[in-house]
Image (spheres, grey):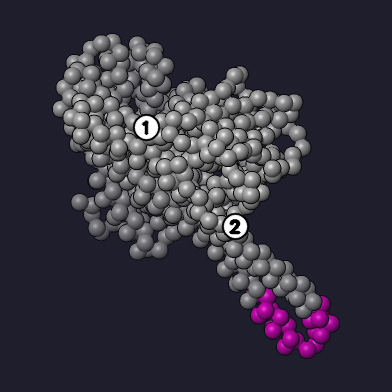
Amino acid sequence: MLDESVSKPELFSAYLNLSKFSSNRDVSIYYGSKALQIAENIGDDVRVAKAHLRLSNPWRRKGDLEKALNHVLIALDIFKNVKDDKGVSEALNVIGTTYGNQGNYRAAISYNKQAVEINSKLGRLTKLANDYNNLGETYRLWKKLDSALINYQKALDLYIQEEVDYGIAYATGNIGLVFAEQGKYELAEDKMEEATLTLEKLGDRYPIAVYQTSIADIYRERGDLHLALKSAHQSLTIGEEEKLKEQIRDASLKLSELYSEKGDYKKAFEYQSQYLAYRDSINSAETIRKMADLRTEFEVSQKQIEVDLLNQEKKTQQAVGIGLVSGLSMVVVLVIVLLRNNEKKKKINDLLEEQKLKLEQTNETKDKFFSIISHDLRGPVNAFHGISQLIKAYISNGRTEELMEVTDDIDKSVDGLSELLDNLLNWAVQQQGHVPNVPEKVSFNEMVTDLFKTFDNMAKSKSISLESGLGDDIALWVDRNSTMTILRNIVNNSLKFTETGGKVIVSATSEEEIAVIKITDTGIGIPKEKLKELFELKARERSWGTDGEKGLGLGLQLAYEFVRMNNGSIEVESAVDEGTTFIVRLPLFEKVGDPVEVKRV
């Protein structure tokens, strides 16, 4: 127990250090909360921010990403208000790590790079090493191993220069994780064992649990299931003792895979169930939604602060004008000041009106994104209908042994749906009142591969052949997210209106400056009277797919808008009972040309 006779600032520092250096997450949260309480009592904003930032780390390690993000956003807001660049960089780093743990890698890298830029300017080498280490971890989780290795090595060099033991251990072990994923098992094992020796002395078991899961994979590759199971159980034990949800999740999945290979399906099923429970508690759609709400709330609050400041400035200017009226002897000066004051008032009113319009545009954009999310999720969710029918058929026919195979389809559908939800929600909350359009070099073949993963089960449920007529890869110069929305909506439309046993084919060719993408189906076709209104969002009779799927035409309207936003064109050729072909033309990366007019056929 700390001596309560010492000053409150000293108590704050003591509690903050106890929280920082405690390896037990619950103890770290306890002391961090005590530090926060003292900081709030003495009314010290900077200390309040530091306590919130400290609390975000143990909550993140425990797997409660919502609480972690809430604490760090409060800290970031305070640091920005007091213009504390050091605090801002640390908060940005923690936000990036939190989004990386949740699987939102693009957002994570954006925040990590902002932290790198600030600490590079400030010359804070140890903090810069932490930034590079976190950036490397995000790239590793994203399977971009070369980028991960480059950043880990930068971190290690700085840690060695600054003689930071824990940092050297972390960076060394992380390099070992990359070597393991590259198949360099001996190097990987050496690096992780070297890191473990240091971390055991420091009492930090969190990374050791990660290393043991990776080492289990190494033993499995060598054919030694006994040692593989031993390592995986060690990782699980550490996770359970330290209450680390992410490590319990990963170790449970590894144990499920190993016991399945061993033929012990009962234990494999038990650990698979445990894995699913922890995965859903960490990365559920509800958690993603809450994190997105927190981020949106933070950005809206920043806008409101700007509006409040402008209103306060307006009131101040009015007071100045009233005060000047009392100086009759300064009539000439007063007239000049009043004229200038009126000009400032007009500028302030213009700014307030501009802020009002931006907020209205933000609301309109929000509504559009909600429509996008609703429509884009409909297709993947329909895929579960086919899987449920397959399960019923297996059960009714007594083919229970084949149910294990169905779990692979369920996992694929869940992963695809989760990834789609991540992209859409991250895309929506990152924007500030406008539809995003960030052109970049994009591989068309990679997009088609992701697209087919999303719609694989939906196609199987209707026995539709989903085919690609792809040759050499084509590089597009487009906004990736909006282009994926274009392709998803058209393919979803084709699957919806194609009968059982039909085909949907995606192909692409290049013509001078343009990529010509064709999505062809053998479906029921589109009547001529509907073709003219196909890309317009207006009241019309609800259309129904071949299996009774609902549709209002929103997807094609979005496809039309996003093609135009990407400087492309879209047209459709169709005949009733003969099928439909959508033709999308988009700029090539090698030859970015002028915008092309959108056609309607």
Q: Which residue lies furthest to the right in this view?
A: 332
Can you identify the residue that label 2 sits on?
Answer: 538
The answer to whether residue 408 of the structure is visible from this angle is yes
Compared across the picture, whether 32 is left or right of 352 comes to: left
Can you identify the residue that label 1 sits on?
Answer: 412
Q: Distance between the residues labelled 1 and 2?
A: 35 Å
Query: What secondary structure is found at the residue carrying circle 2?
Result: loop
State the predominant SS element of the stretch in magenta.
helix
| Front of the two marks 1 and 2 | 2
Q: Position of residue 471 (x, y in %)?
A: 59, 19
- Dot 2 amino acid type: Lys
Examine the structure image and report whether residue 396 is included in the region drawn in magenta: no
Examine the structure image and report whether residue 322 is included in the region drawn in magenta: yes
Q: Where is residue 66 in the image (x, y as percent from the top left)?
A: 36, 49
Residue at 18% x, 29% y: name it. Answer: 398
Chain part drawn in magenta: 316-336
Q: Choose between 507 and 246: the one closer to the eye.
A: 507
